[in-house]
Image: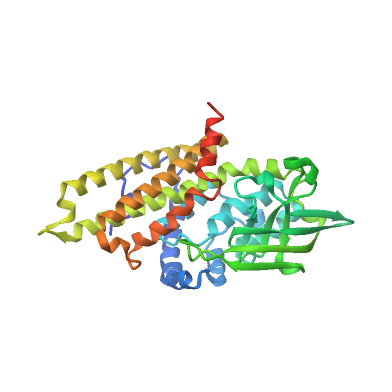
Amino acid sequence: MTNPAEVLALPKPAWITEDVAMLYDMAHRFLSDEIAPHYDAYEKNEIVDRSAWGKAGAAGLLCASMPEEYGGAGGSFAHESAIIEAIGHVGVDGFGIGLHNAIVAPYILHYGSEEQKKKWLPKMASGELIGAIAMTEPGAGSDLQGVKTRAEKGGNQYRISGSKTFITNGQNANLIVVVTKTDPARGAKGTSLIVVETDEVEGFERGRNLDKIGLKANDTSELFFNDVRVPTANLLGAEEGQGFVQLMQQLPQERLMIGTGAIAMAERALAATIDYVKERQAFGQKIIDFQNTQFKLAELKTEITIGRTFYNDCVARHLAGGLDPVTASMAKYWLSDLQGRVVDECLQLFGGYGYMNEYPIARMYRDARVQRIYGGTNEIMKLLIARSL
């Protein structure tokens, strides 16, 4: 079987150090042995078992970029990239540890107090706490300034009221970073991030595990906060009103992370298609022997190579602290667009079998589509890029 990690035969960039490469290999083995055999069941049940999270924590795949003093592995985004790429190459894309590791945990690390970090991060590293971030609402998607969820302060508590939707890890999560308005009159400047530990509060309800086109194994949910009371100590940041700035500071990494999954799936799709066309025959010859097949695969390999080169450069810039929001938007939009094109072209080369759910390319086709929507739609990405012109 063609190895997705080697399908391009590119030299390794400097950020893939020996320990990053070792983590990728370990993650690939763990996901292949512990998650992939159960993945069809997770897809059917539309949720990954909590036990899988505990196993991932024990294997060192949770909070790899968090400092060791908080239970993490002391790594960087390079290590998170290795894990997310392994997820994409193995084909267990609905296992939501990327969001837990590279989106939720960094909010606590960067904006949490010492007490908050010591309280929550070790439990996130073990899998005892599963993270989610509650941004999107029924009436506010990419427009984060339109958030209606309120957090009213009374004494040493906040009372949170509102509803969220499309929340990744929504059924499993028991630590949720909630985007709220602490002062609606101030617009974006009245936005705050407040952490809710769902096991410790009343008034929190999970709605439906939403019936999606793809990423079936990932629980994506409605969440309801019905006068949920949490300590004021659960506010992220030294004062209220910092939430919008905090979100803007962390969105480049979220968008780069979407690019990670995109390039990994594109590589997997190409590898799977190469294997298929070398075996499948039509009109007395292998499909790989048709010039059209060769040209299509040549085009895809070239485009994926361009995408991988751009992605590697973005990671290097991010690790050096220089990935600006515009370039992160380019990575999110272009790589997820590339992912969609590659998977579609690859499915075509599978012919009728590509439309059958038993073939992995069909699942990739379903799973890829949302990449152009979440994390800010690709249309929003283009608007952000256009502002730099």
Residue at x 34% of width, y 54% of height: 269
Residue at the far left in the pictured view = 284
Q: Residue furthest right?
A: 155
Judging from the image, the colouring scheme is rainbow
**Residue 22 or residue 45, whichever sits in front:** 45
Residue 67, visible in the rendered structure: no
Q: Relative to 11, is 230 on the left or the right?
A: right
Q: Is residue 198 above or below residue 108?
A: below
Residue 308 vs 63, above or below: the answer is above
Q: Is 337 placed left or right of 207 in the picture? A: left
Residue 116 occupies quadrant: bottom right
In the shown orientation, is residue 166 left or right of residue 28?
right
Q: Identify which residue is drawn at 48% across, 48% down.
A: 372
Residue 304, position as x, y percentages in the image: 35, 44
Residue 11 lies left or right of residue 125; in this view the side is left
**Residue 384 in the image, given as x and y percentages of width and height:** 56, 35
Q: Quadrant of residue 50?
A: bottom right
Front residue of 75/287: it is 287
Percent x, y of residue 386: 53, 31
Q: Quadrant of residue 185?
A: top right
Residue depicted at 76% across the width and 59% down the height: 161
Tally of numbered tags: 0
Image position, residue 203 (x, y; %): 76, 67
Q: Quadrant of the N terminus?
A: bottom left
